[in-house]
Image (tube, rainbow, N blue to C red):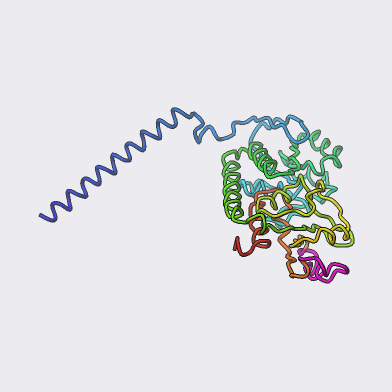
């Protein structure tokens, strides 16, 4: 008898599962009928027209098979979209992901035009930060039959998302671009939720030094790095300045930050030690309390998919008790 009831229970559960599956299929079908933007329609149909950062309308006839990137942030976007095999050339400054070490190098700020053309690319990803210095070279690439897209020089997270969307559309990876942006936004939302626990009295003032003395540069308002500090509920002591700007030592001493973040440890030995021993800085709160931390430059200064990780690293450095 017990066996019979057990069998009956399994049978009923099976019917329930089947009914649930049927209902799920019906719901899925209804959703697709209501929303024609199905997975299939998310695929890019070529040709596509892209309006790039220079306001040029670029028509891409087919999915690019050979891509050259002129700046590391564009390279990181391309690889995150799964286009590592398609990338055939990168700048001398590219370091991530590790696969770029095996890619052909096309130069730095002054790219090697002949080298790029020899790689036979069908798409070159340029950047708004340097395009104005290489107008003639980019035009020569276009005259050679190579499509050139100038990706915007992002000043905010929203503009970073736009960059990822642009490269995604140009390369036929719209769906993947949306997934990357969604993942970034999810990480940022989680950080904001934790940062909300920080009261106004607990908020720290932060000075970010992106290059060392004697020519010290920092990040002011209208930069994604200043936005990072806002996200984690920290005050940027250079928030009254605009963009990436040079700043003098007296101004920092006067502002007296609670935390100093350096971003040049990848090429300068012991950056924190340099700041801590700097003449005239011994009375700055960050120096007195030894709150000088170097963070991974690439993930806080490159306008690409790893910026969300950069926010996490800044949060851990500035508010370790809240975020670690």
Q: Residue at x 73, y 46 (%)?
A: 69
Residue 309 lies in quadrant: bottom right
* Prevalent SS, magenta region: loop
Give 228 or 296, whichever is nearer the viewer. Answer: 228
x 22%, y 50%: residue: 10
Specify the farthest residue to the front. Answer: 201
Vertical order, 206 against 56 (above or below):
below
- Eyeballing the image, is 224 above or below 36? below
Residue 1 located left or right of residue 167: left
Specify the quadrant of the image occupied by residue 116: top right
> Is 259 contained in the magenta span?
no
Residue found 60% across the figure and 40% down from its top: 173
Specify start and end residues of the magenta stretch as a single range: 265-285
Say whether residue 194 is left or right of residue 226: left
The N terminus - image quarter: bottom left
- Where the C terminus falls, by quadrant? bottom right
Nearest the viewer among 49 and 212 is 212
- 118 vs 293, nearest the viewer: 293
x%, y% of residue 101?
71, 57
Count of numbered circles in the view: 0
**Horizontal and vertical percent for residue 222?**
76, 44
Tell me where residue 283 appears, x and y as whole percent. Answer: 82, 68
* Residue 199 place in picture, x, y as percent: 63, 55
Residue 93 shown left or right of residue 312 in the figure: right
Q: Check residue 272 for magenta coloring.
A: yes
């Amino acid at each position: 008898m017990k066996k019979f009831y057990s069998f009956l229970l399994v049978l009923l559960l099976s019917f329930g599962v089947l009914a649930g599956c049927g209902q799920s299929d019906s719901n899925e079908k209804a959703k697709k009928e209501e929303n024609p933007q199905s997975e299939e329609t998310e695929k890019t149909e070529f040709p596509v027209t892209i309006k790039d950062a220079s306001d040029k309308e670029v028509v891409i006839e087919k999915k690019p098979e050979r891509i050259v990137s002129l700046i590391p942030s564009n390279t990181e976007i391309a690889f995150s979209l799964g286009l590592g095999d398609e990338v055939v050339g990168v700048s001398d400054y590219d370091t991530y992901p590790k696969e770029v070490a095996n890619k052909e190098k096309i130069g730095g700020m002054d790219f090697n035009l002949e080298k790029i053309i020899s790689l036979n690319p069908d798409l070159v990803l340029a950047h708004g930060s340097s395009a104005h210095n290489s107008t003639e070279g980019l035009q020569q690439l276009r005259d050679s039959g190579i499509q050139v897209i100038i990706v915007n020089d992002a000043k905010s997270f929203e503009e970073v998302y736009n960059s990822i969307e642009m490269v995604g559309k140009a390369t036929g990876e719209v769906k993947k671009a949306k997934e990357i942006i969604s993942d970034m936004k999810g990480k940022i939302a989680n950080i904001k939720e934790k940062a909300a626990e920080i009261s106004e009295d607990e908020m720290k003032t932060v000075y970010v030094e992106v290059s060392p003395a004697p020519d010290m540069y920092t990040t002011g308002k209208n930069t994604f790095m200043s936005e990072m500090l806002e996200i984690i509920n920290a005050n940027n002591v250079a928030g009254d300045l605009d963009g990436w700007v040079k700043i003098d030592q007296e101004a920092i001493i006067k502002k007296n930050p609670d935390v100093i973040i350096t971003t040049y440890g990848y090429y300068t030995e012991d950056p924190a030690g340099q700041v801590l021993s700097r003449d005239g800085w011994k009375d700055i709160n960050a120096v007195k309390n030894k709150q000088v931390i170097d963070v991974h430059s690439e993930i806080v200064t490159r306008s690409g998919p790893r910026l969300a990780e950069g926010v996490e690293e800044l949060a851990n450095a500035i508010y370790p008790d809240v975020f670690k």
